[in-house]
Amino acid sequence: MDLRVGFLGAGLIATYHSKSLRRSGADVARAGVFDPDPERAAAFAAVSGHTVARSPEEVIEGCDAVYVCTWTSEHPRLVKMAAEAGRAVFCEKPLGVDAATAAEMNDVVERAGVVNQVGLILRRSPVFHMLRSLVHDPRSGGPLAVVFRDDQYLPTRGAYGSTWRGDSDRAGSGVLLEHSIHDVDLLEWIFGPVRRVSASMAENHAIDGIEDVAVATLEFADGTRGSLISVWHDLMSRPSNRQVEVFCRTSRAQLTGEWLGEVEWEFADSAGRTDHTAAEEMLAGTWRGPGGPGENPDGAFVAAVRAGGPAYPDFGVALRAHRVVEACYRSAATGGESVEVAP
Ligand SMILES: NC(=O)c1ccc[n+]([C@@H]2O[C@H](COP(=O)([O-])OP(=O)(O)OC[C@H]3O[C@@H](n4cnc5c(N)ncnc54)[C@H](O)[C@@H]3O)[C@@H](O)[C@H]2O)c1
């Protein structure tokens, strides 16, 4: 039987997942889509082959797996509804507006025993896979320090075509939670758990509760030190850009990009080397594997649902990132004191 896939939310990221599902070649039946904005739902349905439903309940009733792609504050209610009906759930990041909500959502899917995946898609990014393997290369001698810079134009304009990211009731908060939860997750994926943080934030665009600059100093459990700087600015030429530099005892690696991009590195025991095409080589198959670089996250989700799970990355992975983000907000509220990250 075809796996029936439904959508809650028919905006930017729902459209991305729908196209990505098609690209993955996964054999799925397009079931219901619901969005309170009827024009969006109709436009999404016309292109994707889904059928417009009158309510989230109708979508959930008529599918086996559901994508929750609404603005963030609606995720918990819809995930609960879907999980309690026994449906597999793909929920976009951030899971919820704060870490306590994310923890409840993780409990909900665990209790229901449903396959669950979260939209931390950069865990499959070829360039980040490459950076991670350079850091873990035995020739590196182990990591010492990382500088992670992420910048993006304020996402209430341009390609985003929505305003909810400027509303703290719906977004939770600003650049750190809404955007750089990806970065926090990547940092833990590469360097292991963050133990302590100190952070400061600013609201230069004067949008209440929406920080547009977040600066965090991170102390990892293995002793690595890091800094994360995340900025929402007004440079419309820069939709989203990441630059990361890592120093290990006997190596250095630098990444510019997000999915593809440039990775340069040097080891102390060689003359030094740069390679700007390595990410493409990885996509071509050299480094491919389950959960590996370039793997289509939507094809992987459908395969996991068919297999009865588990999917990757799941809500438990996302909860870790929420805990680090929450510690950063806690630190910033105290004027930047060093605070412990909840286990
Ligand atoms: N993984 C990523 O890289 C990535 C990228 C973009 C967005 N996101 C996340 O995806 C989510 C959606 O972002 P977006 O850019 O697609 O926003 P969007 O504004 O383009 O789309 C959200 C849609 O949800 C709809 N909606 C609101 N409440 C609903 C409900 N109860 N039921 C059904 N639909 C409802 C809205 O009408 C809107 O059309 C956010 O949580 C965002 O953080 C993740």
Image (tube, helix red, strand yellow):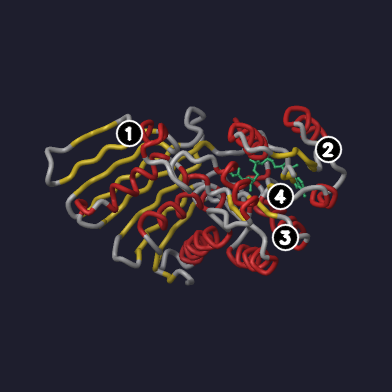
Label 3 amino acid? Ala
Give the mark nearest the N terminus, 4 or 1: 4
Residue under label 4 = 65
The spot of residue 38 in percent (x, y) is: 83, 36
Front in this rendered view, residue 103 or 341: 103
> In the image, is residue 135 above or below residue 259?
below
On screen, residue 48 versus residue 307, left or right, reads right
Q: CA distance from mark 3 to mark 2?
A: 21 Å
Label 4 amino acid? Ala
Q: CA distance from mark 2 to mark 4?
A: 16 Å
Front in this rendered view, residue 229 or 310: 310
Crowd class of label 2 (few under 14; some 14 to 19; many from 20; radius 10 Å): many
Give the mark nearest the N terminus, 1 or 3: 3
Q: CA distance from mark 4 to mark 1?
A: 35 Å
Give the mark nearest the N terminus, 2 or 4: 2
| Helix, strand or loop at mark 2 | strand
Crowd class of label 4 (few under 14; some 14 to 19; many from 20; radius 10 Å): many
> In the image, is residue 182 above or below residue 195?
above
Kindly identify the residue that appears in the image at 45 percent across and 50 percent down: 183
In the rendered structure, find residue 52 and report the number of the disc placed on it.
2
Crowd class of label 1 (few under 14; some 14 to 19; many from 20; radius 10 Å): some
| Helix, strand or loop at mark 3 | helix
Give the mark nearest the N terminus, 3 or 2: 2
Residue under label 3 = 83
Q: CA distance from mark 3 to mark 4?
A: 10 Å
Give the mark nearest the N terminus, 2 or 1: 2
